[in-house]
Image (cartoon, rainbow, N blue to C red):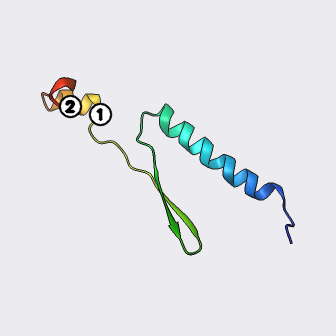
């Protein structure tokens, strides 16, 4: 039945690579939700970066 035993491991380690890449980029961690056929991974971009806050005239303490 399991004709490609490395397939699940490859997909599982892909999630770890995604988490590492997002963390390295300073992005928020994604959310996971179950679906009837699998799962959904939602990645969000943090729009309030340090440069955006400076452009708005705000410092880190004001946020």
- What residue lies at 68% left-to-right and 46% top-to-bottom? 13
- What residue lies at 52% left-to-right and 66% top-to-bottom? 34
Q: Which residue is mark 1?
A: 49
Looking at the image, residue 55 sits to the left or right of residue 1; the answer is left
Q: Give the mark count.
A: 2
- Labelled pair 2, 1 in contact (Cβ < 8 Å): yes
- What residue lies at 44% left-to-right and 51% top-to-bottom? 43
In the depicted structure, whether residue 50 falls above or below residue 21: above
Residue 60, x across and y down, in percent? 22, 25
Residue 59, x across and y down, in percent? 18, 24
Residue 5 falls in image quadrant: bottom right
Residue 59 in view, yes or no: no
Q: Which mark is residue 24?
A: none
- What residue lies at 46% left-to-right and 49% top-to-bottom? 30
Looking at the image, residue 37 sits to the left or right of residue 5; the answer is left
Q: Which residue is mark 2?
A: 53
């Amino acid at each position: 039945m399991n004709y490609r035993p490395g397939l699940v491991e490859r997909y599982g380690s892909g999630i770890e690579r995604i988490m590492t890449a997002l963390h390295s980029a300073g992005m928020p961690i994604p959310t996971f939700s179950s679906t009837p056929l699998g799962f959904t991974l939602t990645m969000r971009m943090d729009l309030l970066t340090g440069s955006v806050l400076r452009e708005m005239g705000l410092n880190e303490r004001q946020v």
